[in-house]
Amino acid sequence: MSDQSYLSLEKLTLAYGDSVAVADLDLSVRRGELIALLGPSGCGKTTTMRAIAGLLPVKSGKVILDGEDMTRTAPNKRAVGLVFQSYALFPHLSVYENVAFGLRLKGMKGAELDAKVQSGIASVGLTKFADRKPAELSGGQQQRVALARSMVMEPKVLLLDEPLSNLDARLRLEMRTELQRVQRETGVTMIFVTHDQAEALSLADRIVVMKNGAIEQIGTPEDIYNRPTSSFVADFVGFENIFKLEGGALKTENGSVPLSFAPGSEAPSAAGLAWRPRMVTLGTGPFRGTVRGTSFAGHSREYLLDSALGPIKAEVDASEPVHVSGSDLSFDLPVHKAAHLSRIA
Ligand SMILES: Nc1ncnc2c1ncn2[C@@H]1O[C@H](COP(=O)(O)OP(=O)(O)OP(=O)(O)O)[C@@H](O)[C@H]1O
């Protein structure tokens, strides 16, 4: 993978009428990268994809692909493929004809067309189903046809908008693997939109977390999961205990609570600290909390504690002794385990 940018969005601003949906967005994607756009509903993921595909005029800024300014290029001249959550297959055409459709439009025919379509269908494991109509296929199979149909066009970038969201849990896992395989085998640059954190973490080379039409954080799955830099991303990936930090003390609803630091170590300069429930130590530590609620989650047990810091969520192995509601417990928020946040809402 080269370090050079293959697809660049430069100060991209996108609007519907007067209403700005994405503002000043900068994103640089390397050739062959698999990027996930992750974020809550309405944050601008689909809008960004539509602009890359040329389906939405750009208000200001640029879309550069493979060294060419595509900002004003028509969608069909961009070499950008699209796979939507609703597979948008032609219902009256067979699998074969669905996959052949775009190639025929480009004027391909005869043996060349046939070879290309056959290999596209084979690459997603649907050779046996070539003559079926979409209605005679499962959701996962339809999604594979949509993928094959885009891939035979040899796009420079393949955009997938919630490609797995209509599939049941088992098929989603299967399609994740399938997408990864196709990506590895073809080396195509892929950008996919998802609401689903687990999907983004398991598939992407890098994750772009969006909020209110802007990028909140870009990083590897490990960065996003372990080192969120803002309270928004921390909350999104499951750090449920988030505090402002001021002068080495946590700011809480009930005032400042000093933290204890390992001898010789200084208070972090971060604006905030965040802990996953798993990172909270139960049973020892400088803080006291009263168990307000507990829930059994199979391999683990979650506790909600009332404390001078406010509500604290803790999670421990289910094999640990059970603390009943009303129990008074010591706990700790180990500073060395915390995510250091530079921005906190
Ligand atoms: N056709 C449209 N006309 C007007 N506003 C729109 C249109 N499509 C989207 N928007 C607005 O633009 C903003 C971004 O929407 P977008 O669809 O890009 O979000 P998203 O992150 O893809 O959300 P979701 O996960 O729900 O698909 C939202 O405020 C949305 O209401």
Image: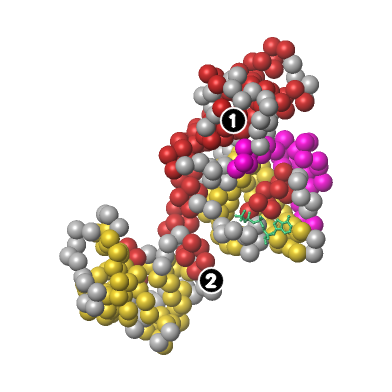
Residue 44 pos. (x, y %): 65, 57
Query: Mark 1 or 2, which is nearer the eye?
Result: 1
Q: Is mark 2 on a helix, strand or loop?
A: loop
Looking at this view, is 86 or 213 the one in front? 86
In this view, 17 is above or below 310: above
As helix, strand or loop, the secondary structure at mark 1 comes to helix
Q: Residues within 10 Å of mark 2 (few under 14, many from 20)?
A: some
Colour convention: secondary structure
Which residue sits at x=65%, y=51%?
A: 46
The residue tagged 2 is: 343
**Which residue is labeled 1 in the image?**
135
Residue shown at the point (75%, 38%) measured from the top left: 78
Which of 3/98 is in front?
A: 98
Residue 145, quarter of picture: top right
Query: Mark 1, residues whose alpha carbon is within 10 Å: few (<14), some, or many (≥20)?
Result: few
Q: In this view, does 333 lie to the left or right of 272?
A: left
Q: Which residue is drawn at 52% across and 73% down?
A: 344
Q: Is residue 30 visible?
A: no
- What type is the residue that disc 2 sits on? Arg
Q: Is the residue 250 above or below the residue 130 in the image?
A: below
Quarter of image, res 101: top right
Residue 252 vertical placement versus 213 (above, below): below
Please give the range of residues in magenta. 59-87
Whether 79 is among the magenta residues is yes
Does the magenta-highlighted stretch encompass residue 230? no
Residue 134 appears in the figure: yes
Spot the residue most to the left.
321
Residue 218 on image: x %, y %: 56, 56
The quadrant of the rendering that contains the N terminus is top right
User: Sequence order check: which comes first, mark 1 or mark 2?
Assistant: 1
